[in-house]
Amino acid sequence: MRKPEQELAEIKSMMERSTRFLSLSGLSGILTGTYALIGAGLAYGWIYYPNSPIGPPSAEYNDSLLHYVLITALIVMVLAITTAWIMSQNKSKKKALTFLSSASKRFAQALFIPVLMGGIFCLALIMRDQIEMLVPATLIFYGIGLVSASHFTLSDIKYLGYCQLILGVISAFLPSFGLILWAIGFGVVHIIYGTMMYYKYER
């Protein structure tokens, strides 16, 4: 005969599966951070070493330089989303979880509405030549999305969101360190978070 504690644990597990998106992959966080560091490294080279063979012809062409950086950021974002989607889907299959459930839809909505609004806001910043505010905007809107989405997945993700928010606010006051803070937020912090999630939930 099963103990009451066992039955309560099973009921709690069933409720959690139905209300929370539990298929986030720690490894995808590590890869996302790696993509971000590579992108930040390329941007750093183009900005501070404009005559390098892999960068724009000269830092004097500010429009060209901005295009290089924005395209790189877009590629990083696409790679990150694609990796997270594929690896989370694979994790769902291994754990016999429904990937496209109501919980995953709530999670995606909570995360991507702030991110989408942040993207539109960044477009307005670019149009008004407020380039120095792009880093704070991306970090802050992403952080808001993560904190909001933490209500529909593993609560650990909110700490990732808090880190992004703090770095975003700091970068707003220290724009000259924007690229470094962006690399820390999207790169280093993601790798640390992904590693912790992998060892805590996936090993």
Image: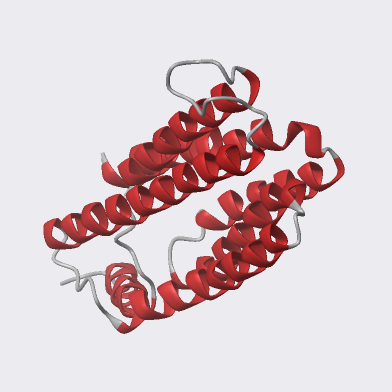
The answer to whether 173 appears left or right of 15 in the picture is right
The answer to whether 150 appears left or right of 98 in the picture is right
Q: Quadrant of the N terminus?
A: bottom left
Q: Quadrant of residue 94?
A: bottom left
Relative height, residue 160 to residue 117 (above, below) = above
The answer to whether 196 appears left or right of 142 in the picture is left
Q: Quadrant of residue 60?
A: top right
Q: Residue furthest bottom?
A: 102
The answer to whether 38 appears left or right of 79 in the picture is right
From the top left corner, tell me how far across and down residue 115 is, in percent.
55, 66
Q: How many marks?
A: 0
On the question of residue 97 being in view, the answer is: yes
| Colouring of the image | secondary structure
Q: Residue at x 58, y 59 (%)?
A: 142
From the top left corner, tell me how far across and down residue 88 is, in percent.
26, 57
Q: Residue furthest right?
A: 173
Q: Quadrant of the C terminus?
A: top left
Instruction: State the residue in front, 57 or 202.
Output: 57
On the question of residue 162 being in view, the answer is: no
Q: Residue at x 41, y 33 (%)?
A: 34
Relative height, residue 194 to residue 164 (above, below) = above
From the top left corner, tell me how far across and down residue 28 is, in percent.
33, 45
Q: Residue at x 64, y 20 (%)?
A: 48
Q: Quadrant of residue 45?
A: top right
Instruction: State the residue in front, 36 or 110.
Output: 36
Q: Residue at x 76, y 61 (%)?
A: 128
Relative height, residue 126 to residue 39 (above, below) = below
From the top left corner, tell me how far across and down residue 37 is, in percent.
48, 31
